[in-house]
Image: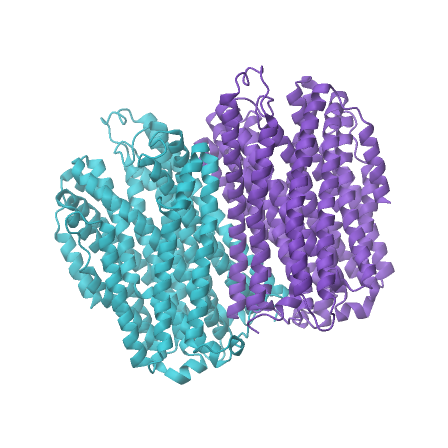
Chain colours: A cyan, B purple
Amino acid sequence: MSLVVAGFIVRWILKQDQGTAGMQSIASAIKTGAEAYLARQYKTISVIAVIFTVIFAAAIRDPSNTWLGVDTAGGFLLGALCSNLAGYIAMYVSVRSNIRAARGAMSSLDRALKIAFRGGIVFGLGVVCLSLIGISSLFLLFNGDPRLIVGFAFGASFAALFAQLGGGIYTKAADMSADLVGKVEAGIPEDDPRNPAVIADLVGDNVGDIAGRGADLFESITAENIGAMLLAIAPAVYALYGLNGLIFPLLARGFGLIGTLVGTFFVYTRKNEDPFKSLTRGLIVTGVICAVGFYALTNLLLNGDMGYFYASLVGIVAAILVAWITDYYTSYSKRPTLDISKSSESGAAPGIATGLAVGMESTGLFIIVIGVAILLAFELGNGFQPFSASFDIASSAFQRGIYGTAIATMGMLSVTPMVLAMDGFGPITDNAAGILEMSGVSEDARSVSDRLDSVGNTTKALTKGYGVASAALSAFLLFSAFLEVAGLKGIDLSRPEVFIGAMIGATLIFMFSSLAIRAVGKTSAVMIVEIRRQFKEIPGIMTGQAKPDYSRCVDISTKAALKNMVVPSLLVVLTPITVGLVLGAEAVGGLLMVGTLVGVLMALFMNNGGAALDNAKKYIEAGNLGGKNSPAHAATVVGDTLGDPLKDTAGPSLHVVVKLLNTITLALAPLFILALLH
Amino acid sequence: MSLVVAGFIVRWILKQDQGTAGMQSIASAIKTGAEAYLARQYKTISVIAVIFTVIFAAAIRDPSNTWLGVDTAGGFLLGALCSNLAGYIAMYVSVRSNIRAARGAMSSLDRALKIAFRGGIVFGLGVVCLSLIGISSLFLLFNGDPRLIVGFAFGASFAALFAQLGGGIYTKAADMSADLVGKVEAGIPEDDPRNPAVIADLVGDNVGDIAGRGADLFESITAENIGAMLLAIAPAVYALYGLNGLIFPLLARGFGLIGTLVGTFFVYTRKNEDPFKSLTRGLIVTGVICAVGFYALTNLLLNGDMGYFYASLVGIVAAILVAWITDYYTSYSKRPTLDISKSSESGAAPGIATGLAVGMESTGLFIIVIGVAILLAFELGNGFQPFSASFDIASSAFQRGIYGTAIATMGMLSVTPMVLAMDGFGPITDNAAGILEMSGVSEDARSVSDRLDSVGNTTKALTKGYGVASAALSAFLLFSAFLEVAGLKGIDLSRPEVFIGAMIGATLIFMFSSLAIRAVGKTSAVMIVEIRRQFKEIPGIMTGQAKPDYSRCVDISTKAALKNMVVPSLLVVLTPITVGLVLGAEAVGGLLMVGTLVGVLMALFMNNGGAALDNAKKYIEAGNLGGKNSPAHAATVVGDTLGDPLKDTAGPSLHVVVKLLNTITLALAPLFILALLH
């Protein structure tokens, strides 16, 4: 049903007016660039995925199920394919909505908002539907055994890592080099058509923020759904609810889709209403419908055990609190970002130091919220049994408690399609603003698109917070699923090999972050050379008499991003496999748990620190502390540029790394049990 | 014996010439400032320590030993006192050696090197002797029960945290604000007498790099000695070696002192020899003597079980490898730092991004070395028994293995007095260079002192690497000591309350780092206002006709640093206590282990990233990539300023935090066993 509605929305979008010929030629350049990049990226991913598929099919062996390897490998390949498809659909819609939203901005704020938001809705519905259809089909195919579906989740996160990292490198390398050469050296404004990298920058929004994020959330909801289903087969839970416990997560997701469809009708702006308000209204409606859905499902499927309903509310409330924390730490009307702006008056270094400190500080409240949510959902799940009774993984109190945390995660994730729509909205309006700027249409339309663009920046930051929150909340349920699958009784950090696994897990996060940040640097170094060359060798660029060669920049960005995404991604895939094969399942459990924890904290640090540095600049640009072109402004420009690779490449890729560690260990647990050291 | 030698060296130093009256007045201003700061700092620490002593004496109860609370609290107070004393001695010598080393530089390189190095030797011998005397006395007092000495280690790390953090804030706030206003705004060179903050900056070297680092390493060696002794009472080890196993760590430390005394004679420069070479020669001699000592001790005390001798060599080799890694990542002749210099050509942001990436990358090789060292020492300790046989903490293979890692840590730490001497050498020459610069003596003497100063920068970076390495290597032995004391069988991360403890531990590191970085920012903000005021209100400062009011800057720095050190330190002390009291001993074990791991990684990231950013600037100042005053140089100046609070405040304080987490849990384990949730 959601897919049909999405189809109708796509038809509606395609019917909208596409504006002037100038606008169309820009939009078509963006479209061509984005399609060419994705085609090559998916080719690279496919080649690597096929190699892994063959290895998994051959290597994974289990005497009790001779087909385990083939089943897992098949699921892996299907998951990777679906992830690519989800990213492609998202990009397909966004490169068609951007130009129409730009044209819409020439008519009214409401028109532009609707087109951009509906583009986002297609993105949200498409991603969630694909995940649901994939899981449900495999669930039916494998006669309701969720252990055979984990390959699908692994494939999804495998492809997502490459997509998010590659897209993230592309978008930030283009952005940084366009800024460094265009803004700083040549002194031309952002999105100026004289900048050779401007099209690459706009392409980046589509391949990074749209296709990358789409793949990220596709694997998130897939892994968490399958994790929740795995916990439903724990003896104590299965004895109570049977198959109903397994179907619950799938139906909960269905309610999320229905809620989103209804919520869509509440997104409109009357007169001069703040567009962010109207998006929030849509989200609230979706949340309420989801809550009602959980109430109904708890009664229908879980014998009316209201603890689980309350656990789902815990998840929804935690999502709201995390959004509030993210807003507090990154909005420029609040203390932390104001501090960055103020210390930038003493120079770039004090500003950046404060920015890094703000990013680190933002982990505190966040972890408190997630910690309390896990504990509360755990206790709600087992009916507030004394802690000491739930300490054994084989106990009913533990198994029911963990199922409670799974339901809380389902609650948090129920509004995903709507959140994705709000997220997709951002890059679409960003692109629309760029198209308007480049084609030089009326100031009025641009002020409309700028207003939407700034709302898009906020929703983008909130989605990232939501992504990390779901990763953190689901971590504990995915660990327990791993214990279940690997047949472990616990992860004892005081064993030397487990502690070494934990050391490797934590270090992996630092190494990956380093490689991701440097990949952006390396890619933009190539870009910078090319942009400088064009400014020098093509006469008349600066006067507007000659057009820069946009496509060469797009091409260079594409090649460099793809080249630089491979090593960090393979590092993340091969490290846990190696540790598992050498040190065994419990050591890889240590790697998983500590790696997840450190990954979540680093992601928060980089996302929030980067966003705060960005907004500290915006605060000064709004005319405070000397305004544009003051020394404080120059200092915050440095901070913003530094924040870019942190918040848009390394940080978001870490969400995927965390999930990938989970799915890789789940899928390959049968291999790790046979490790060298056992 | 070492103390007597130290006394003779002090007498020798005091006999040296003190140079011109101008130099003496500067040195005396530094001395007054440093003494005033330390007096106030120790007052603050004492007040807080006494409050905690009373609480511990009242709260710690154990039916089998009614005096446990009083014993622990007494040890705590004594440890804090000894730590303060160690810091004070170190500062006492350094503020007297700096002026004499400055005068020595006017005669010859060898003379200046000898004075500065001998000042460092007093520092090294004093710190190690105090620790040995404290532990040995308590060991005799408590009839050989090491469990009653843990309070001493706790007190030492408690005082060290305040000292290292307070000193670190002081030194970097003075440094940053002197640079930002003096160099950048007023355009005067470093250490220029016209800068009102120049004396505060030189005071900072003494209270941060000398007194702070002294307290840091005092508690390091104390905690590790006591930890090793605790492991010697594990049944399997005690059955084999009895009291000898307990005395081994103390005697090993003694050999380190002897080795250092002999090594001292090898530190001299003939003709134009590189001073770094002569320091290395001294270190090698010390290392060889220590190795011989371990061979003798293994034969005498440990029944000639050569596995333990090899384990001690593992520790010594690991120390050398870590020094090599630190040098690779921070020296400007190597790839990582060169990359920073090169990317700074595109601007400050790409340079800083590369710097952060280099810091993160440096964790990889380091963790491999430490991981291999732990595993190897563990296996050497239990005679290469199969892994699966050593998985139980109650097994003989485990207990002997862990004792092997303790011996490896002793091996690494055996050269501590010599390393400390090399470390103390740095700030003394730094001060000497500053005194010469300010008093405007001959260029020749300044070039000598500059040469020693740059060697001092290298030894400082290496000592920090050594500090983190000893923290990481000893982590596993201290965890095991905690399990032993708390009577736990393991730390099972899959229990919800243990995982929450781990979450809190990891987050604590991020929060503390944030607070430490911001404390520098806050303190320097106050300083900057004062420096600007003096430039504006005191006419004739810039022409040299009027003297700036140095003492006001010193005073402001003192007050602000003390104010800003309290909250972060208390956070670190109170968090594990709260977690232990609420969630119990195993949860606090999760906090401890994951907090240690993350703390070590963050410290490496900040120390090495900051040092690499610093040296990237030095590379350009040496005339490369456009040299001084090029845009690339300006970019690296920003990077260097950002690196300062990372590498000299937050990073080194994290070593202490890691150790404090260990000693706090060891000392308060009897309380945590009675936690709320049990």
What is the count of numbered marks? 0
Expressed as whole percent of the image width and height from the top left, the position of residue B280 reads: 74, 38
The reply, left or right, for residue B174 in relation to residue B295 is: left
Q: Nearer the viewer, residue A500 or B32?
A: B32
Residue B385 figure quarter: bottom right
Residue in the image at 47% along x and 71% along y: A480
Determine whether B358 is above or below B307 in the image.
Answer: above
Q: Is residue B515 visible?
A: yes
Q: Nearer the viewer, residue A596 or B481?
A: B481
Expressed as whole percent of the image width and height from the top left, the position of residue B20 reads: 73, 19
The reply, left or right, for residue B38 in relation to residue B601 is: right
The reply, left or right, for residue A59 in relation to residue A22 is: right
Residue in the image at 28% along x and 55% along y: A88
Determine whether B630 is above or below A59 in the image.
Answer: above
Which residue is at the far bottom? A239
Residue in the image at 23% along x and 46% along y: A452
Q: Quadrant of the C terminus of chain B?
A: bottom right
Q: Is residue A525 visible?
A: no
Expressed as whole percent of the image width and height from the top left, the position of residue A674 reads: 56, 72
Determine whether B444 is above or below A104 in the image.
Answer: above
Expressed as whole percent of the image width and height from the top left, the position of residue B602 reads: 55, 49
